[in-house]
Amino acid sequence: MRQWKIGWMSCALALTAGCASVPERKAFEAVEKEESEERLTPARVPVPSRLPSITDASLLDDYLAYGALNNPELEAAFNRWKAALEAVPQARSLPDPKFNYGYFIREVETRVGPQQQRLGLAQMFPWFGKLELQGAVAMEEAEAARLRYESAKLKLFFQIKEAYYELYYLRQAIGITEDNIQLIKHLESVAQSRFKSGAPVTGVVKAQVELSKLSDRLLTLNEMRDPIAAKLNASLNRAPDAPLPWPESADVTMAAIDVGRWAAWMKENPELKSLEALVRKEDKAMALARKAYYPDLTLGVDYIQTGDALNAATPDDGKDAVIAQFSVNIPLWTGKYRAGVAEARARGDAARQTRKNRENLLMADVRMALYRFRDAERKIDLYRNTLVPQARGALEVAQSSYESGQTDFLNLIDAQRLLLQFELEAERAVADREQQLAEIEMLVGRELPRLGTEGEQTP
C-alpha cells in the first residue's frame, strides 16, 4: 500500500516540457541531411562521399568538393551549428524535479503513531510563456549559427576560386614569358647576323640584356608557384608543399548580372540573414526579460511514513500522511528586472545597428566588385581583340624594318616588350574577371546565372 502511494506520487510529478516544435524538428532534419547526404558546391555539383583525388585532370569543381569535405574551419562552423541546435531542447525543458528525504532521528509521536521518515518530490514550473521564449531564443541562435555555416561555405569557395585562378594566371604568365624568351633568342640571332654584316654590336648587347631580364622574370614567376599553391592547399586542408597540378585553361564565363535585382539578392546573403536572426533573438530575449516580473510556481507532494500507534485499537492506526505543496517565488527586486529589460533592449538595438552597418558595407563591396568585374571584361575584349593583334603586327613590322636596316634594335625591343605586356594583361584580366565573379557570388550569397562561355551564342 505504501509502495503504491509512493509510485503514484512519483508518476504524478514526472512532467516534461512537451514535444519538439515543428521548426525544431525541421532544423534537426536539416543537420542530419547536411551530415549524411551529399553536400553541394555553389554550381550545384554533388560532393562525393569521400575526398576526390587532385590530379592533372581535376577541374575547379573537384577542388570545391575537396574543400567542402575537408576544410577544418567549415567543419568547425558546422559543429557550432549542431551545438547551438542541441541547446534548444535544453532551453525549453523544465528544470529537474527535486527529491527530498528526511529521517526523524527522534520520532514525532502522533495519535495514529510515530512519524518515522519523510519523502518529497517537487517540480518548479516557470511562469506561462517563459519556457516557450527560452526555446525561441535558443532557436534563433541556432538559426544564426546555421546561416554562419552557410556564409563560411561561401567564403571557403571564394578562397578556393581566388587561389585557383591566381595559379591559372601564373601558368599563363610563365608560358607567355617562355615564348618571349624564345622570341628574344631569335631576335638575338638576327642581331648577330647583322653584326657580322657590319651593323653595330648594340643590337646584340640589347638582345642579351633583354634576355637576362626575361630569364630573371621567369625565375620569379616559377618561384611564385609555391606560395600560391600553399594558399590553395591551406583552403583544402592539405600540406603546404602537397603537389598541385597546373589548372586547365579558364573559359571566360558569361554571367547574367542584373543590377536591378541586387536588393533582392542581398536579402538572401547568409551573413545578413544570420544578423537578422540575432535581431529576432534579442527581441525574444527582451520579451523573456519582461517575464521576470512574474513568479515561478512550484508544486510538490510529501509522503510521511508513520509507525504503529501504541494502542492498536486507535482509529487509523499507522496511517501514513500525504501532503500537497504549493509555493511561488516573490519577484520583489524590480530594479533588477528593469535592468534586465534595459539590457535586452540595448542588445537588440546593437544587433539592428550591426546588421545595418554590415548591409551598407556589403553593398559597397558588391559595387566595387562589380566595377572590377566589368573593368576586367572590358580589358579582355580590348587586349584580346585589339591591342595584342596590333602589338603582334607592330612587332612584325619592326622586325622587318630592322632586318632591312630601316630602324634600330631599340624599336624592335620596344615592340617586343609591348607585346609581352599586352599578352600578360590579357591573361591577368581573365583571372581578375573570374575572381571578381567569385567575390560577387560570395557577397550576394548565390550563384549568378550562366549564359555560356565566350564565343558561344547566348540564348
Image (cartoon, rainbow, N blue to C red):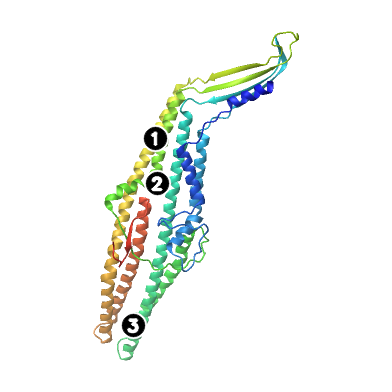
- Which residue is nearer to you in this view: 339 or 389? 389
Task: State the SS at label 1.
Answer: helix
Whether residue 104 is situated above or below residue 251 in the rendered picture: above
Rate crowding at label 2 as few (under 14), some (14 to 19) or many (20 or more) other CA atoms within 10 Å.
Answer: many
Q: Is residue 264 visible?
A: yes
Q: Are marks 2 and 1 in contact (CB under 8 Å)?
A: no
First reached walking from the N terminus: tag 2 or tag 1: 2
Name the residue at 49% across, 44% down. Answer: 29
Q: Is residue 336 visible?
A: no
* Residue 288 appears left or right of 410: right
Task: State the SS at label 2.
Answer: helix
Q: Which residue is mark 1?
A: 348
First reached walking from the N terminus: tag 3 or tag 1: 3
Residue type at the position of mark 3: Leu
Q: Position of residue 170 (x, y in %)?
A: 40, 67
Rate crowding at label 1 as few (under 14), some (14 to 19) or many (20 or more) other CA atoms within 10 Å.
Answer: many
Name the residue at 49% across, 41% down. Answer: 85
Q: Position of residue 423 (x, y in %)?
A: 32, 71
Task: State the SS at label 3.
Answer: helix
Whether residue 99 is situated above or below residue 200 in the rendered picture: above
Q: Measure the alpha-carbon separation of dots 2 and 3.
A: 56 Å
Name the residue at 48% across, 49% down. Answer: 34
Q: Which residue is mark 3?
A: 187
Q: Position of residue 47 (x, y in %)?
A: 47, 57
